[in-house]
Amino acid sequence: MKKALLSFIVVIICSLGAFAQVTMSPHISIGGEYGLTTGNLSNYYGSVVGGSVKVEVPVSSPKFNITGTLGFTSYLVRLDYNGPLNLKPDQFLPLELGVKYYFSKIAYVEGDAGVSFNLQDNFTGSSNAFIYSPVIGFSAPTNNHKGTIDLGLRYESRVQSNANINQVALRLAYRFGPTFPAEKKKKEAK
């Protein structure tokens, strides 16, 4: 896992050089998340709640962005669980780096990968794990175009030696700044 964390840091440092080449401004979004577990752990954990802060930095155009995400995720024990295990909510701190591509002015696809730190060493056992998540979503501008409402649907998997922890989640966030720079009006010839 140390190699994965070191690789993650190297990618961030190498990406900083690319950030300096663009004049478009980065965006920050803050949001809440709700999801449902999938796979074997869905017998124990039902809902997943959390929050995250995401930074988007345009690289070559406003359509292509490098992303960095820091979040908090809590897997809640099923209300109908009556098994022999004394379960508590499992809590994670995911740290991800990814790419986001807008295929229209508001719709995008995104892929993230990173490390997930287990804060509540419970049923899942491992202290940290590799995490990846493909996302599809849209960022709709607010009425004053100074920000966007971001809605993304993702599948997320924490890859561990004893069992993968998976979820399908919806993230609703406010993204500061417009999705694309405002188009300059052409001056009319006199």
Image (spheres, helix red, strand yellow):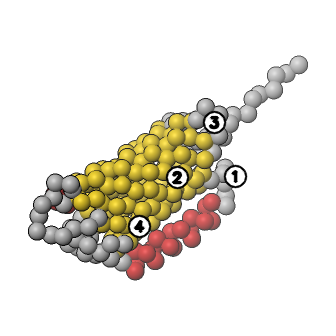
Tag nearer the camera, 3 or 1: 3
Where is mark 2, residue-wise?
30
First in sequence: mark 3 vs mark 2: 2
Depth check, front residue: 161 or 190: 161
Where is mark 1, residue-wise?
23
Depth check, front residue: 5 or 82: 82
Where is mark 3, residue-wise?
145
First in sequence: mark 1 vs mark 2: 1
First in sequence: mark 1 vs mark 4: 1
Q: Residue at x 21, y 68 (%)?
A: 87
Q: Residue at x 34, y 61 (%)?
A: 74
Q: Residue at x 60, y 65 (%)?
A: 16
Which mark, by number, is residue 93? 4
Amino acid type, label 2:
Ile
Mark 2 Cα-neighbour bin, 10 Å: few <14, some 14–19, many ≥20:
some
Q: Does the residue at mark 1 contact the one at mark 4 (Cβ under 8 Å)?
A: no
First in sequence: mark 4 vs mark 2: 2
Residue 186 versus residue 84 in the image, above or below: above
Placement of the N terminus among the 4 image quadrants: bottom left
Q: Residue at x 57, y 36 (%)?
A: 141
Q: Indicate left or right for 69 with 120 as reference.
A: right
Mark 1 Cα-neighbour bin, 10 Å: few <14, some 14–19, many ≥20:
few
Amino acid type, label 1:
Thr
Tag nearer the camera, 1 or 2: 2
Tag nearer the camera, 1 or 4: 4
